[in-house]
Amino acid sequence: MAAGPALSSPRPGGDRVPEGAPRHRPRPPRAGHRLRGGRAHALLARLGYRAVGIDCAPTAVTDARARHPAADIRLFDFDSDDAARLPHPAFAVITCRLVYRWAAGKPALLSRVRRLLAPGGVFWVVTSVHDPAQGRARSWDAETSEVELLTAGWSKVQVSPLGPSLRCYALRP
């Protein structure tokens, strides 16, 4: 896989690496992510990625920088800021943890991710999905149509359950 940055959205949760995730890199590729607390950033760095953490909330950036002072963590609104402000033109991994459900412009988000993925890259999305066995849908559960949009148009889609309703989608162009 060509080196490239990765973007992820570290939200509260474990540091478990999803099935299919690269566990060793011969050289440090770039990785970027959206964050809350910097956990995904730290995990990507431990895996050998040159990780870049982004978030549009100043408080999230401040918190992540306090927890991980050596990390490259930036204030950046993925929906509206110019991608030229990112330190790399392409990323090997882009992650989005517990953010996809709330994205206002999902088609635009997915299009932007596809443009920023390096050849052979992967887009990891962790989101809550409604499971009818769990009862009524919760406000944070992605709807069926949102999951269909998320998974459409990728050459490979791998789904890993992380809990009763949490899923990790590994999406490849």
Image (cartoon, helix red, strand yellow):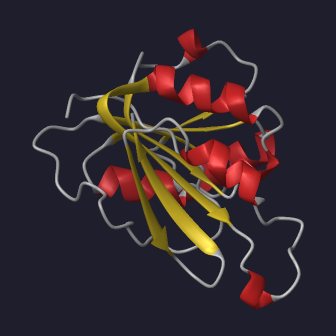
The quarter of the picture where residue 98 lies is bottom right
Of residue 169 and residue 35, the one placed in the foreground of this image is: 169
Q: Quadrant of the C terminus?
A: top left
**Which residue is drawn at the image coordinates 24% and 54% (left, top)?**
22
The location of residue 165, given as percent across then percent down, is 66, 77
Of residue 100 and residue 70, the one placed in the foreground of this image is: 100
The location of residue 67, given as percent across then percent down, is 57, 58
The location of residue 26, given as percent across then percent down, is 10, 43
The quarter of the picture where residue 90 lies is top left
- Judge whether 124 appears above or below 1 on screen: below
* Residue 108 horizontal side relative to residue 150, left or right: right
Answer whether residue 78 is visible to the viewer in this image: no
* Residue 1 horizontal side relative to residue 86, left or right: left
Of residue 173 and residue 148, the one placed in the foreground of this image is: 148
* Residue 92 horizontal side relative to residue 22, left or right: right
Answer whether residue 50 is visible to the viewer in this image: yes
The quarter of the picture where residue 54 lies is top right
**Which residue is drawn at the image coordinates 39% and 31% (left, top)?**
5
Residue furthest to the left in view is 26
Q: Quadrant of the N terminus?
A: top left
**Which residue is drawn at the image coordinates 29% and 60% (left, top)?**
20
- Judge whether 111 appears above or below 70 on screen: above
- Judge whether 65 appears above or below 83 on screen: below
The location of residue 162, given as percent across then percent down, is 52, 77
**Which residue is drawn at the image coordinates 59% and 24% (left, top)?**
111
